[in-house]
Image (tube, rainbow, N blue to C red):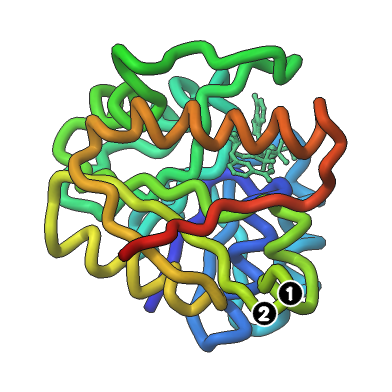
Amino acid sequence: MKIGIIGAGNMGSSLGKFWAQNGHKLMFSYSRDTAKLEKIAQSIGENATVGTPAEAVQFGDVVLLSVPYGAIGDALKAAGSLDGKILFSCVNALLPDMSGLAVGTTTSAAEEIAKLAPGARVVEALPLFAEVLSSPSQRFDKLTATIFYTGDDAEAKQVVAGLLSEIDVDVVDAGSLKNSRFVEPAMFLLVQLAYGQQLGQVAFKLLKR
Ligand SMILES: NC(=O)c1ccc[n+]([C@@H]2O[C@H](COP(=O)([O-])OP(=O)(O)OC[C@H]3O[C@@H](n4cnc5c(N)ncnc54)[C@H](OP(=O)(O)O)[C@@H]3O)[C@@H](O)[C@H]2O)c1
């Protein structure tokens, strides 16, 4: 699969490295320092190239949006039309100082992104902390972590669930994009546990019976 990546920081580069190892082709974009993008692409090798956000959209069967919440407007403007594209957002609505969420429970980063990208088939998943993604193993002892994904387009969700399943995790369909209003605050709790309570690398595990 071809994956255009908008935002090549902790998440974009960790997910990108993961997918490139599994044979996907990547195009990294959107940095204030193009040399950074080149360096990431070079570290990945022949499966990675660099382009503008608009080129990444043209390139990708799937487009990953992995920028801070405050940059979504600028990034999506640079991306141009995403009409018909599968837009995988891993954006949480974190405030820049990580003291809280800019939106939550009445809307979500995912829904705001959908408004900014008309016609895009938005799926959201907030897949693990970047530190966990870039570790040799994504397991917690023997357990796989749970990743929730939301969206309103069944086919797009299936594609993103497939990409998520390549990580050693269990993926759970958390329903419509609207449910991101609850998934994002839940992920913010994990941020609080990891950094505020200094629990280190943490993740969710959904128990069912
Ligand atoms: N980190 C995690 O563990 C984690 C987990 C789940 C979800 N998320 C979410 O994933 C998203 C990305 O997080 P991240 O940790 O990967 O962030 P990050 O490391 O700060 O990466 C952000 C990327 O956006 C680029 N960018 C370009 N223009 C920007 C601008 N004007 N302002 C800010 N960034 C700009 C940055 O490029 P340059 O810096 O090169 O300019 C960088 O490549 C966030 O919405 C976050 O809430 C993160």
Label 2 residue SS: loop
Viewer-nearest residue: 149 or 34: 149
Q: Rounded to the nearest whole Å, what is the CA distance between mark 2 and mark 1?
A: 4 Å
Q: Which of the numbered marks, if any, corresponds to residue 141?
A: 1
Q: At 73% across and 74% down in the image, what residue appears? A: 141
Q: Quadrant of the C terminus?
A: bottom left
Neighbourhood count class around disc 2 (C-alpha, 10 Å): few under 14, some 14–19, many 20 upward: few
Q: Position of residue 45 (x, y in %)?
A: 72, 81
Q: At 71% across and 20% down in the image, what residue appears? A: 98
Q: Position of residue 10 (x, y in %)?
A: 72, 49
Q: Position of residue 182 (x, y in %)?
A: 37, 29
Q: At 70% across and 50% down in the image, what residue appears? A: 202
Q: Which of the numbered marks, if any, corresponds to residue 45?
A: none
Label 1 residue SS: loop
Q: Quadrant of ligand 1?
A: top right
Viewer-nearest residue: 208 or 40: 208
Residue identifier under label 2: 142
Viewer-nearest residue: 133 or 171: 171
The kind of residue on which mark 1 rests is: Asp
